[in-house]
Image (tube, helix red, strand yellow):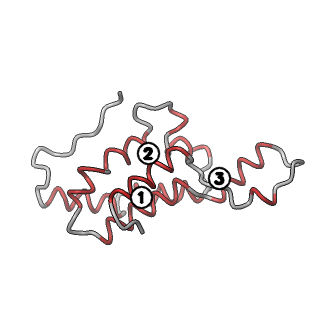
Amino acid sequence: APQSLEELRGLIQAAAKHPTGPSRGAAILSASVSPSRKKAAAHQAGGGIGQACNAVASWLRQNPDDHRAFFDSTFRLLLQNAFGLGKPKNTSWLYIASRHPSSSDAKHLQSLLDPHGQLMAAIVEADARCLYPSGFTFPIEA
């Protein structure tokens, strides 16, 4: 789990640049394997998106008294990458997960966005504590 919000932001930014992370199976794939099979193997291996989703959930779980700092500094970045706000559609985590729904990245993203998951629990808790009396503002596309 990340030790700081800065580290968490770095993991989210790294996942945006390399959404599937390093392919664990890349070394064993030979040149005779089709490019589509290599891509599918990379998505099965998981990586950047799954790691970032797990890091967000872990940070929220381990820092229950500091959710305001998360929402102030990291939540917007998470939403921008998950939903692809202000970016080409094919770079959003949701788009990537929809192209490979059985990948570990897709499963981790689904877990993070689950209505009963850690992220939604933090949102509900922040709302209950009136951390944002005017409510949350969803970032608009740039």
Task: Specify the quadrant that holds the C terminus.
Answer: top left
Residue 138 lies, in percent from the top left, at: 27, 39
Q: Nearer the viewer, residue 129 or 71?
A: 71
In-image side of 41 versus 141 (left or right): right
Q: Pick out the residue farthest to the top.
A: 142
Residue 121 lies, in percent from the top left, at: 28, 62
Tell me if label 2 and label 1 are in contact, CB under 8 Å: yes
Q: Nearer the viewer, residue 112 or 59?
A: 59
Q: On residue 43, which mark appears?
A: 3
In the image, is residue 43 above or below residue 34?
below
The residue positioned 40% from the left and 65% from the top of the image is: 2
Task: Specify the quadrant that holds the N terminus.
Answer: bottom left
Q: Specify the amino acid type for callout 1.
A: Leu
Secondary structure under the numbered disc 1 in the rendered image: helix
The residue positioned 11% from the left and 44% from the top of the image is: 134
In the image, is residue 120 above or below residue 139?
below
Q: Which residue is mark 1?
A: 112
In the image, is residue 93 above or below residue 113?
above
Which of marks 2 and 3 precedes in the sequence? Answer: 3
The residue positioned 82% from the left and 55% from the top of the image is: 29
Distance between mark 2 and mark 1 Cα atoms: 10 Å
In the image, is residue 133 above or below residue 118?
above
Q: Specify the amino acid type for callout 3.
A: His
Q: Which residue is mark 2?
A: 82
